[in-house]
Image (cartoon, rainbow, N blue to C red):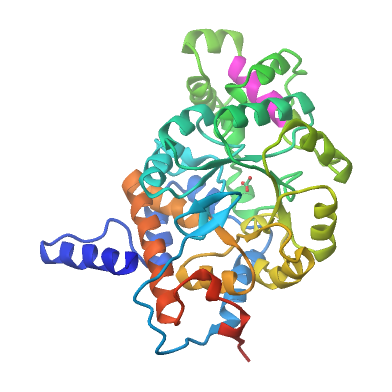
Amino acid sequence: VVGINRQTAIYTGGVSGRRPRIPTDVTQLEERARSVMSADAFGYVAAGAGSEETVRENRAAFGRWALVPRMLRDVSKRDISVELFGRRLPAPFLLAPVGVLELAHREAELAVARAAKPLGVPLIMSNQGSQPMEQVSESLGDTPRWFQLYWSTENELVESFVSRAENCGCEAIVLTLDTTTVGWRPRDLDLAFLPFLRGRGIAQYTSDPVFSRLMDEASTPRFQPRPTLAALRTLIELTRRFPGPFAKTLRTRRAQVAVQRFSEIFSRPSLSWDDLPFLRERTSLPIVLKGILRSEDAKRALDYGVDGIVVSNHGGRQVDGSIATLDALPDVVAAVDDRVPVLLDSGVRGGADVIRARALGARAVLIGRPYVYALALAGAQGVRELLENLIAEIDLTMGLSGCQSLDELDSNLLRRRA
Ligand code: GLV
């Protein structure tokens, strides 16, 4: 029914001469977003590692499975809700953590939160957010939120982020495993663009009391840009972005120090299984590991008392040539054997993808780039439409495949394409 309601709203809008704000077709959505975003911003969002083979493979993997719909099964009543960590979610998807949303829209996460709130679609707030998690949480009301964590070289900062997330009402901590350092991304490299160096996407840090103290321990700047006009413009830009009065920030060089300190402590390539107990001891929230692609890693995660897994290759942004997540999913699902929920991201674009991931054992999926493009095109309203469209498409695809609920989806509904 939600699917039909959405269709009706769109078609009756057309009778009064109203068209949707954002294209329902994802290829067009991306094209339109490209036309309104700056080259740097679009490049950063769209980028994949290396030749972007993995970005393409993530999509291709869905195409290797065909749905074989069942007929005459009374699908007049349908339910696409799903249970996750004791919460009933309206649909089997969450908003993936995406950093630096200010690249898409001035209102960034606050717009996303406003869109997600009335629908109850959970938001996973990014460690590289454009706005502090406290502000975003306020805009979410009762809608569930999780926090995505990058493990800094400074354990104190990890602790601080986790305790802030708890205070914000986050219902899970999502530890990203695959980005202990940023991948090789030609689009960004060719534009020589890394948003963090311009003070973007570091709001969780600049709003953090521990980070503020760590800033005082910054070493001499590693990034000493040549004093060009562009460097001056960047300096003004990042100084303006830093919380507090402009003149004072400029005088004290706090914004430059923040960027410098951030780049020193952002990630920890030495991260290993032995670090997990530190996190486990510091939070009673469910811990979800994001970036698992191998069954033995999934098994090991269970041994460490992890509460959930996201099969992810970071939207193809980290390891070029990496396995597509849908191809990795069945082995991980088999290894986990229903002991904890397994989620999937990377390449999910429409209802049929969600249905297929579900049929192969994912409890739910995360969507990323599509909502960023919708945000770029039409702010909160764009994201709201995108979410409503995806909910509708899941509902209709499930029903038209002969299923009343997500529990009826299994591999029997799929055939491997030749
Ligand atoms: C960092 O998280 C990125 O994927 O850009």
Q: Position of residue 69 (x, y in %)?
A: 47, 86
Residue 132 at least partly seen: no
Q: Position of residue 9 (x, y in %)?
A: 22, 62
Residue at 59% x, 70% y is: 357
User: Where's residue 57, x and y in %?
Assistant: 63, 71
| Prevailing secondary structure class for the magenta stretch in the rendered image | helix
In the picture, measured across the screen, residue 349 lies left or right of residue 190, that is left
Region rendered in magenta: 254-263
- Residue furthest right in the image: 274
Q: Is residue 388 above or below residue 381?
A: below
Res 328 visible: yes
Total numbered badges shown on the rendered structure? 0
Q: Based on the picture, tell me whether residue 150 belongs to the magenta stretch.
A: no
Q: Residue at x 37, y 40 (%)?
A: 114
Specify the quadrant that holds the N terminus. bottom left
Of residues 124 and 381, the one drawn nearer to the viewer in this rendering: 124
Relative vertical location of residue 261 with respect to residue 98 in this rendering, above or below:
above
Task: Give residue 360's quadrant in the image.
Answer: bottom right
Q: Nearer the viewer, residue 81 or 292?
A: 81
**Which residue occupies the extreme left position in the image?**
16
Q: Quadrant of residue 198?
A: top right
- Which image quarter holds the C terminus? bottom right
Name the residue at 76% across, 18% down. 220
Residue that lies at the very extreme toward the bottom in this rendered image: 418
Q: Position of residue 332 (x, y in %)?
A: 75, 66
Residue shown at 54% from the left, 23% from the top: 235
